[in-house]
Each structure stands twice: as structure tokens, then as C-alpha cells.
Image (tube, rainbow, N blue to C red):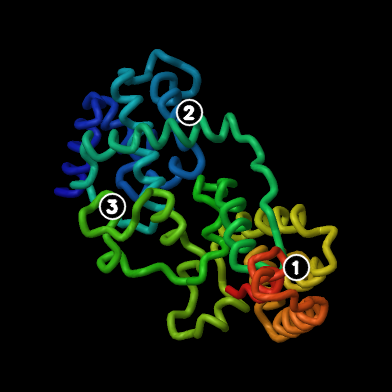
Amino acid sequence: MAAAVNYRAMLGRLGFTQDAQAFISDAQRGGFDTLASLDVLVSGDPTGGNFVKSMRRPGGDSSNGVLVSFRAETNFKSLLFFLRHKKRTNRTVVIGDITLANITALAMRQEKEVEDKANFVTPENPKFDPDDWAQSAENVLDFVSKHPGVTGIPLSYVLRDTLRVKAEADDPAFGRVDSEYASMEEEMISRASILSSTAVATMTDAELEDVGPFTDIFLMDSAKVYDLLTTLFGDKEYYTYIRNAGKKKNAINGRKAWFALFKHFVGPNFLEHIQTTSEATLRSLKYMGVSQLTSPYANRPKKNMKMP
């Protein structure tokens, strides 16, 4: 009973009338009587527009509809985005968190994501030098991060080092004084789910990388990353590493493709390539006196010896 009262009070804070609160909570009409139940709207009707329309004109008939003010509709939209953001960053939410100050604090973020999606321009392909893997990898990650995933999270989360998300209690949210995150993007990339909730906690990371199970959203985002890598490297001789690792039957995994490329460039084959190239470069150099050490020739081995 107390939970239902608190839930209705929360709806009242958003500006809904008592009739509207009853409509939303009623199992036969709205059917959304808890925060958890609103997840259907978070995923399927993220602005709440269709639901609010059904409140005003249930079954297309306004005669038995309820009044929903513009203020309530706007705040409801902000609530759904707030819940969506908390879900994508693996943060728990309780009724007490739903205040106008908290939900409207993300309003500018919400508008930015809508605007970015509408005006998205494919970024320029990154510079990639096989002999400078460290910088090249950074360039690729930056390129990938400029592409949003299904829920608006930068796609570079697919390629992060860690599979698991830190315990919420040990990882203060962006905006808190003790948070390690300098931006909302950093938090999203670090805390986005890769593994599904059914993943076995006792399995090693290597086992989980191989079999998962992964979230549906990650799988969709990972397929997008695979397509980006194919666009960047599809005509390169080392694309075979991407294709062989990232495309298995009906499964497309950009994460596996990326780490296969990583292994190729920092593994034994790449070290052998670096050594061979460097030796050939050294053999081509001629000593021309101390004064020549500052010439471009003096820098040629350095480029070949760059390592991550």
C-alpha cells in the first residue's frame, strides 16, 4: 500500500491530476503501477507521446479520456529519459530519486542526443599507420566513439578492455565529487552492459569473451562496429583477421574482430615485422658524420620501433 501511495505521489510531482494518476496505475487502462513497469515505455515509447495520447483519447475517443497538461507531459518525457539513462549506465532508481530537479537535470542531454541523431554526419576515416599501432588504435577508437549505439552510448564501449561493470557502490556516478568520470560519455562507455544478467559470475573473462551470453543491445552494437571496421580495413591485407574472428555463421561480433586485429599487430607476427623492417632500414643508412644525426635519416628507425 505504501509503495502504491508513494508511486502516485511521484506522478503528482510530475503534474498529473488524480484522474491521470489513476489511469496510469490502473491495470486495465494504463497498467504502469511501478517504476519497473515503465520499462516498457522506456524501450518502446521513449518520449511517452503515444501513451499520453492514449490517455487523452483512449480507443480514439476523447469523451472518456483524462486531462494531461503540457507540464505533466513534458515532465513524463523527462522521467522516461532519466530512467533510460540510469538503465543504460546500470544505476538503480528508487521512487525517492524521482524529483523534478533530478529528471530535468538531464533535459539538455536529452535534447542533445535528439539533435545529434537528426544531424549525424559520418566522421572522417581515421589515420592508420600499421607501424604506429598505439596512435592508430587511439584514432580508430575515437572514430568509433563518434558513432552512437542503439541506446545512444558511444560505440567504443563495445571495444573497452573490461567485460564486466563495476559494482555501483564502488563507482560513483558522473557529477558526484568522488566520481572518476570527467564526462557523461565516459560513464556510459564504462558502465554499459556487454554481458547479459544470466552470465555466470564464476566464469573467467576468457570464457565469457567466447560464449557470453551477451545482451541483445550489445550484439546489435557489436555488429555495427564490425561494419565500421570493415569500412576502414576491408581492402587491407590484414582484413582477414577481422573477418575470420568477427563473422561466424549468423553471428557478427565487432569486439572479437577488433581484438583479433589487436593481437595481429602486437603479437609475434607484428614484432617480427617490426624487427625485419627496422633491420632493413638500418642497413640502408650510411654514416655521414655526427652533423648528419639530425637529418631525416636519423629518425627513420624510430618510427619503425614505435610500440604500444
Mark pair 3, 1: CA separation:
39 Å
Q: Position of residue 295 (x, y in %)?
A: 69, 64
Residue 72 sits in which quadrant? Answer: top left
Reading the chain from its start, which is encountered first: label 2 or label 1?
A: 2
Residue occupying the far left of the picture: 2
Q: Label 2 is placed on what type of residue?
A: Asn
Residue 93 — which label? Answer: 3
Q: Is residue 240 left or right of residue 245?
A: right
Secondary structure under tag 3 reads loop
Residue 177 — which label? Answer: none
Reading the chain from its start, which is encountered first: label 3 or label 2?
A: 2
Residue 50 — which label? Answer: 2
Mark pair 3, 2: CA separation:
24 Å
Which one is in front, 237 or 196?
237
Q: Label 3 is placed on what type of residue?
A: Val
Q: Residue under circle 1?
A: 242
Circle 3/circle 1 CB separation < 8 Å: no
Which one is in front, 10 or 221?
221
Q: Residue at x 33, y 38 (%)?
A: 106
In the image, residue 252 above or below residue 74: below
Q: Is residue 14 left or right of residue 145?
A: left
Q: Position of residue 38 (x, y in %)?
A: 38, 44
Q: Label 1 is placed on what type of residue?
A: Ile
Q: Residue at x 41, y 26 (%)?
A: 52
In the image, residue 57 above or below residue 195: above
Q: Residue at x 56, y 72 (%)?
A: 213
Residue 158 sits in which quadrant? Answer: bottom right
Circle 3 crowding by C-alpha within 10 Å: few under 14, some 14–19, many from 20: some
Q: Position of residue 142 (x, y in %)?
A: 57, 53
